[in-house]
Image: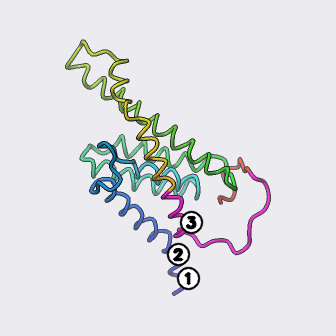
Amino acid sequence: MRVFLARIRPGLVYTIVILLGSSLQFNSQLFELNGILPDFLLVFPLLTGMRYGPRDGMIIGLSCGFLRDYLAGRYFGLGLFFTFLLAWGSGFLPVIRGRLRYALYAAVIVFTTIFLRFGRAVLSFFAQYSDMHNLRFLWFLKEMSQDLLLMILMNLTIAAVTVALHLVLPPYPRAKKPRSGVMINFEPGGPHV
């Protein structure tokens, strides 16, 4: 029974966190500030990929991307693909132990939030440009990025909550002996912290 519970523990923990996070993102105004919600279904797959490797990032990225597209009422595809790709790719980042890894987490979340926000702005511009030909791109980009700083701060806040949740309820049992060795491991197949 103990072996069985150890085998299904990651699936249970990930399922609970994804369901809780998706309900907080789409059904709750608990984290809403000025009409902006943090993007939990982007932050969680990124952190999972960086912390537990590309396989877990890929699975969680697909699950969160599916929920993101489904609950937002969009067509399936683009959100699912980008969430999967970013989560899987984050598993190949260098493994950093110690407190320095939190700086890497923050940098990846900031970069990804900016990348997705400007990507959405460009796609929205071209979708609206077909109707209004006098629309200026720089003005539109400025309008779409007015709340970018607030979105970054909210994503970093939800990332801190997610990291704390990972520390309290990790999907995998903790190692019995502390790890030693190099501080930064650039091998993609190397041990993850």
Highlighted range, magenta = 161-183
Q: 165 above or below 131?
A: below
* Three-letter code for the amino acid on which mark 1 is drawn: Val
Tell me, yes or no, whether the two marked residues, 2 and 1, touch with CB atoms within 8 Å. yes
Q: Residues within 10 Å of mark 3 (few under 14, many from 20)?
A: few
Going by the picture, which residue comes out furthest to the bottom?
Answer: 1
* Three-letter code for the amino acid on which mark 2 is drawn: Arg
Please check the rendered image and state whether residue 123 is part of the magenta-colored stretch, yes or no: no
Locate residue 28, reporting x and y percent.
29, 57
- The residue to which callout 3 is attached is 167
Q: Residue at x 29, y 43 (%)?
A: 35
Q: 169 above or below 35?
A: below
Locate residue 186, reporting x and y percent.
71, 47
Q: Quadrant of residue 12?
A: bottom left
- The residue to which callout 2 is attached is 7
* Circle 2 SS class: helix
In the rendered structure, find residue 3 and report the number of the disc placed on it. Answer: 1
Q: Residues within 10 Å of mark 1 (few under 14, many from 20)?
A: few
Please check the rendered image and state whether residue 163 is part of the magenta-colored stretch, yes or no: yes
Q: Residue at x 31, y 15 (%)?
A: 136
Instruction: Give the prevailing secondary structure in the magenta stretch.
Output: loop
* Circle 3 SS class: helix
